[in-house]
Amino acid sequence: MKIASFNINGIKARIAALTDWLKESDPDVALLQEIKSIDDAFPRSVFEDMGYQVETHGQKGFNGVAILSKHPLEDVTRGLPGDDSDEQARYIEATVVGKTAVRMCGLYLPNGNPAPGPKYDYKLAWMERLQARAETLLAAEEPFFMAGDYNIIPQAEDAATPSAWQKDALHLPQSRTAWRKLLNLGLTEAFRSRTQGPGHYTFWDYQAGAWNRNDGIRIDHFLLSPGCADLLTDVQIDKHVRDREKPSDHVPIWITLDI
DNA sequence: ATGACAATCAGAGATTGA
């Protein structure tokens, strides 16, 4: 089963880019971030006509996540547990059943800039809640993964220009510490389990010719539970998508699981 | 040190992103 994560930066502006990529890449499941749309305005029929079940968790203007799936989804839940006052739509879960049932968590982790400040505090608090959710899912011993735009540059080699990110919320020591804490639960970062070395990115800024200079960062990730890591058969970044007409500033990353 | 670019909402320009 092929499962992708893609920060599309606005569903209404990205219908052509997204449908073109879906036709070409043909994922069974696509976890989307930054749909920037309320649920009622999501163009669900476009994707239903392509054979996808559509589950959204949106809000007006910003944020918003969704799941497209060619296989039936079960137990869809919206929102990251741990703070009932959090109104930002950044998290959705669903179970997909193949040979094995796998719990899928789609997330859009807060950017956190400027740091320090309230937005950075929110990012770190959100990561603590994500940690707690991962602990709960690990205790349930069902295979799961957490995928999406983490807004975390894990290591210097994950940025073309590491010095530019030293004081940025995406790469501050506290951010990387929270990331490593997640990994230390026993989660496997899918991409780094298969590919080493610098030069692998999932985001290029629209500004200052970042794409043409390959000035990118790797911030979209799949974290796999131990039981899910055993099912991993491939992981790739669809870099070429960034070179198309009217692209998102992110590109898709996908895994295949033997389920 | 700053700005550059893009999407949204609204119907201009502010806000947000990374």
Image (spheres, rainbow, N blue to C red):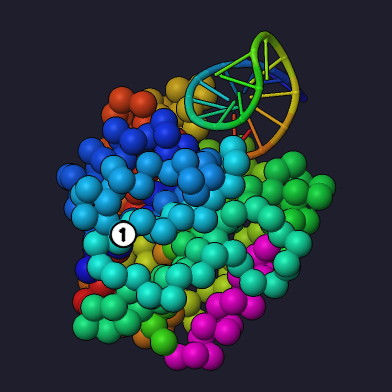
Which of A45 and A224 lies nearest the eye of the viewer? A45
Locate residue A255 relative to residue A214 in the image: left or right. left
- Percent across and percent down for residue A154 are 54, 58
Quadrant where the N terminus of chain A is found in the figure:
bottom left
Image vertical order of residue A58 relative to residue A143, above or below:
above
Residue carrying label 1: A53
Query: Residue A43 occupies which quadrant of the picture?
Result: top left
Image vertical order of residue A88 relative to residue A129, above or below:
above
Residue A185 lies in magenta, yes or no? no
Which of A103 and A167 lies nearest the eye of the viewer? A103
**Residue found at the very far right of the displayed protein:** A117
Instruction: Answer whether residue A214 is visible to the viewer in this image.
Output: no
Image vertical order of residue A37 relative to residue B2, above or below:
below
Q: In the rendered structure, the residue with mark 1 lies on which chain?
A: A
Kind of residue sitting beneath label 1: Gln
- Percent across and percent down for residue A200 are 38, 48
- Percent across and percent down for residue A192 are 39, 64
> Which residue shows up at 21% across the image and 55% down it?
A51
> Which residue shows up at 45% across the image and 23% down it?
A209
Query: Residue A162 occupies which quadrant of the picture?
Result: top right
Q: Which residues are magenta?
A: A126-141
- Percent across and percent down for residue A45 are 31, 45
Image vertical order of residue A207 relative to residue A249, above or below:
above
Which of A119 and A39 lies nearest the eye of the viewer? A39
Quadrant where the C terminus of chain A is found in the figure:
bottom left
* Overall secondary structure of the magenta section: helix
The residue tagged with tag 1: helix, strand or loop? strand
Give neighbour class at mark 1: few <14, some 14-19, many 20+ (Cα, 10 Å): some
Which of A119 and B9 lies nearest the eye of the viewer? B9
